[in-house]
């Protein structure tokens, strides 16, 4: 069975970058009829917050990305300790004592000498007495000893990968204060939870190399790994600094529709054409991870707006009913109102502006050269109630009387009735206008 997980740290709000990872893992699990686990990587007690964990769930629920169960790393610390003991017993976990400042100095020296800044394993050369002294002075932290060989895997997106373990520092698995780090916690979870597919950002490629050795050392089964490209801004600039402004909850507040966002992200960076899907089922059926490429993917939040407008325009009056009722559209007018305005709104909430126009009328906008024409036309407007033929009959009569036609005929009348130059079909809108300009 396919088992995937989305593993955010509850240290902030989800943004579009996280969503790409969540969505891919969700789609793979659902497509394979498998399980999708929401795993909260909350081993950092200082930065993890329950409010963020709640916000993550709320954002995923808004999008309809349902999970089969939640796992929290903070409740599995004993499992990580057991794995660490096992690695220690095998001689694969060793204690180190350098301070961050000392490590930084080493790295600078290596770089100055044109060498890669890989940890030099100095701690492996300490004898027991030296270690005891350092331990008493500053406490030790623990690194996994990599086997210096090439680490290879066939990546679901990047293809064949081969990384020389000697070019990578032995990863720190446990900090001096005892905090277990992501690298081992994730491995233990992936192994014990039977994760079959791991999809994450390409910033994790080196982690994957080291995790493959840790999983193998612990006797676990390797999942299939795929690394999607990272999102950039529209000009190819790094998105990392702007991700704070691309939080899912902000997009929701702006009226972006879940299906517009999901459709966009399910195809962005893939060789499949962009599509606005109508449902999660369609989206699942149309997803193929192998069609995604390795190059950084440009993301422009502006692309979500026309997609949202398109999605909203396709909603039925029944689907719009809660919004229409909330803004005060009477039930009997709702179908005609939605029919009139559905192609003229960027978001669901934007219908409120058209309803305000229908209910309250608009300040007429009449150019001086049109004043006489508009007055003549308004005098010819029959008494309400109007129907959808009124506009056509009226403008035909006005045309016959004034000799005006085309834009010169219609635009001044639209502006006189709605105050603006664009908007819904006037034939549909006119019967809904409850306050008309005063006629002379
Ligand atoms: N908590 C990790 C992150 O957000 C998870 C990475 C992974 O998928 O393994 O980067």
Image: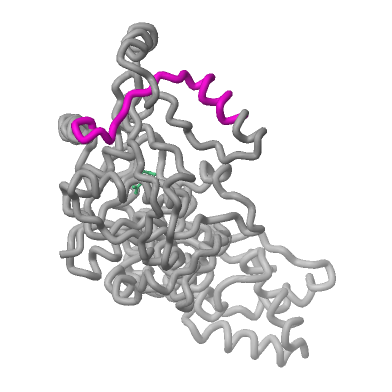
Q: Quadrant of ligand 1?
A: top left
Residue 223 drawn above or below residue 114: below
- Coloration of the structure image: one colour
Residue found at x 52% / y 74%: 429
From this viewpoint, which residue is outermost toward the bottom? 400
Is residue 170 one of those drawn in magenta?
Answer: no
Residue 304 vs 431, above or below: the answer is: above
User: Looking at the rendering, which quadrant does residue 275 occupy?
Assistant: bottom left
Residue at x-position 72% and y-position 63%: 365
Q: Which residues are magenta?
A: 88-108
Q: Position of residue 175 (x, y in %)?
A: 35, 24
Q: In percent of the image, x 49 and y 51: which residue is there?
A: 254
In the image as oriented, which residue stretches furthest toward the right? 369
Q: For this rendering, which residue is in front, 200 or 259?
A: 200
Q: Is residue 193 left or right of residue 140?
A: left
Q: Position of residue 413 (x, y in %)?
A: 68, 75
Residue 81 in which image quadrant: top left
């Amino acid at each position: 069975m396919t088992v995937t997980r989305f593993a955010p740290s509850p240290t902030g709000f989800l943004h579009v970058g996280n969503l790409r990872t969540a969505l891919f893992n969700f789609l793979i699990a659902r497509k394979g009829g498998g399980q999708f686990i929401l795993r909260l990587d909350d081993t950092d007690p200082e930065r993890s917050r329950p409010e963020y964990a709640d916000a993550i769930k709320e954002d995923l629920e808004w999008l309809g990305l349902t999970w089969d169960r939640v796992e929290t790393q903070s409740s599995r610390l004993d499992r990580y300790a057991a794995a660490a003991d096992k690695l220690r017993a095998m001689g694969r976990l060793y204690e180190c004592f350098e301070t961050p400042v000392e490590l930084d100095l080493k790295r600078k020296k290596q770089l100055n000498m044109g060498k890669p800044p890989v940890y030099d394993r100095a701690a492996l050369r300490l004898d027991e007495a030296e270690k005891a002294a350092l331990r008493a002075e500053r406490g030790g932290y623990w690194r996994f000893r990599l086997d210096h060989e090439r680490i290879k895997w066939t990546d679901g997106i990047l293809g064949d990968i081969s990384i020389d373990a000697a070019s990578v520092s032995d990863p720190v698995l446990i900090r001096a204060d005892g905090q277990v780090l992501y690298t081992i916690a994730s491995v233990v979870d992936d192994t014990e939870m039977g994760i079959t597919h791991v999809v994450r950002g390409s910033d994790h490629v080196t982690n994957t190399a080291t995790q493959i050795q840790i999983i193998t050392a612990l006797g676990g089964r390797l999942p299939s790994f795929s690394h999607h490209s990272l999102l950039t801004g529209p000009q190819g600039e790094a998105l990392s600094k702007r991700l704070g402004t691309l939080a899912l909850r902000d997009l929701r507040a702006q009226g972006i529709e879940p299906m517009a966002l999901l459709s966009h992200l399910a195809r962005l960076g893939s060789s499949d054409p962009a599509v606005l899907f109508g449902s999660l089922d369609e989206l699942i059926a149309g997803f193929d991870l192998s069609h995604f490429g390795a190059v950084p993917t440009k993301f422009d939040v502006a692309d979500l707006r026309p997609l949202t407008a398109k999605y909203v325009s396709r909603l039925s009056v029944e689907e719009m009913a809660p919004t229409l009722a909330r803004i005060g559209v009477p039930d009997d007018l709702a179908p005609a109102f939605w029919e009139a305005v559905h192609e003229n709104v960027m978001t669901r909430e934007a219908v409120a502006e058209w309803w305000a126009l229908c209910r309250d009328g608009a300040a007429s906008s009449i150019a001086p050269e049109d004043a006489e024409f508009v007055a003549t036309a308004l005098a010819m407007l029959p008494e309400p109630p109007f129907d959808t033929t009124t506009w056509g009959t009226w403008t035909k009569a006005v045309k016959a009387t004034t000799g005006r036609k085309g834009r010169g005929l219609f635009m001044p009348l639209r502006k006189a009735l709605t105050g603006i130059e664009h908007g819904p079909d006037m034939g549909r809108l006119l019967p809904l206008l409850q306050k008309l300009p005063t006629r002379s």
